Amino acid sequence: MASDQPTQGRTIRPNPKRQGILVALALVGLAIGYGLGFVFKPATAPPAVKSRYAPPVKGQSPPLAQLSTENKAKLAPKAPTLPIPNVVLPENALPQGEGPVRAYEEALPKEVVVTVERLGVPKALPATPVELAAVPPATVKAPKTWHKYAIPVTPDGRPMIAIVFDDLGIDKSRTRRAIALPGPMSMSFLTYAKRAAEQIGAAREAGHEIWMHVPMEPSSRSIDPGPKVLLREASPEELASSLEWSLDRFEGYVGINNHMGSRFTTYLPGMEVLMAELNRRGLAFLDSVTSGRSMGRKAAVAAGVDFAIRNIFIDHQNDVAMINQQLAKIEALARKQGYAIAIGHPREKTLQAITPWLKELEEKGFQLVPVSTLLQQTDAGGGN
């Protein structure tokens, strides 16, 4: 029979073997956990770059109030700018805002060099029968009113060089500097030049010959040749209206040459309208040759208009070294064919290069003449 009295003096003694097993299991667990933690440890984030403004919420720009002046300028919305076209811009002038760019001239991808020039209207046209059939003879022979505005210069047997300054009248300071150069030269003023009469009067007093620079459509539609530009798509009535506006802008000029026009001058119907009006007014035409496919000569011959063709651009690249190379080409061509016509513009580097060159022309054996002298020389040879 069991006793009802509680057992006294009983104690629990630890089992060393069991404790060792438990300690070992704990250590193994710690080792496994540490190893797994090391293997799958995430990459340490790079240190944050100190910013002057709070990081923006995804898809949202930081408030302008939190930006520094420098960052405000960087992040401020910018007005859309035009793609820079291949044009020669005036000095210190950049495209501003939206709209066409007003340029001095078209900068041709490769300058069109005319090495053989035909002046006036020849007796026999060096053209194929197909070309001749496409050019009807002029029906009306108008008086040559350009003669009374020409600067009289008598050729003396030396090679002749005619220098034409285009785009005059807009940059008045450089226009004055071009006018101050020794002449006679041919000064071609833009139709939309302000105070043109005053500037033309100064050029005439300085002994230069006056021509008109008429805006004609360029190939690039991103540049603006000026108001009342002659457009290829214009109707004959619109074309006649624009042409009349231009030709009436000032008086006392020998003829016109094209301002830009690489697109318009290749369009024979438009050039025929132009030449018909020049013939009616008795004016001459100087083809600036901004396109190798110009119809200037063909239309002039058909209309009976006295014409000349530009040989060399002096400054199609706005670089003094290149301009000096072009001036040397003018000399070489003039010695080869007896004359040369070169076109330049009132730009700083052009004025810088041409000023000493003009002073040396006489010593080099050349005669400086206006374009009209070459037209008259052709007439004396039995042109028309």
Image: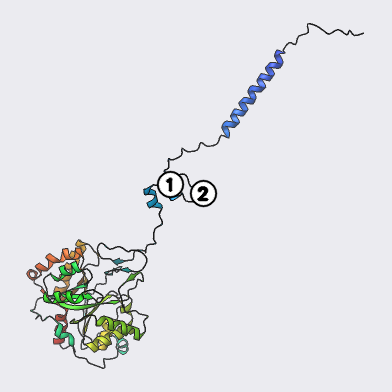
Mark 1 / mark 2, whichever is N-terminal: 2
Q: Crowding near pointer 2: few (<14 within 10 Å), some, many (20+)?
A: few
Q: Give the residue at the far right of this rendering.
A: 1
Q: Quadrant of the N terminus?
A: top right
Give the vertical position of 80 relative to 375 (above or below): above
Q: Which residue is at 60% across, 31% downward?
A: 36
Secondary structure beneath dot 1 equals helix
Depth check: 324 or 76 in front?
A: 76
Label 1: few (<14), some (14–19) or many (≥20) C-alpha neighbours in 10 Å = few
Q: Amino acid at mark 2?
A: Lys
Residue 51, position as x, y percentages in the image: 43, 42
**Furthest-bottom residue in this view:** 139
In the rendered picture of this protein, how many numbered marks are placed on residues? 2
Disc sitting over residue 223 in the figure:
none
Q: Residue at x 20, y 63 (%)?
A: 348
> Would residue 161 be visible to someone looking at this image?
no
Gap between marks 1 and 2, in whole Å? 16 Å
The residue sitting at the front extreme is 65
Determine the secondary structure under disc 2. Answer: loop
Q: Position of residue 205 (x, y in %)?
A: 11, 76
Seen in the picture, residue 124 relative to 200 is either above or below; the reply is below
Residues 382 and 261: in front is 261
- The numbered mark at residue 66 is 1
Q: Position of residue 263 (x, y in %)?
A: 33, 76
The image quarter containing residue 10 is top right
From the image, tell me which residue sits under label 2.
58
- Which of the 4 image quadrants contains residue 310? bottom left
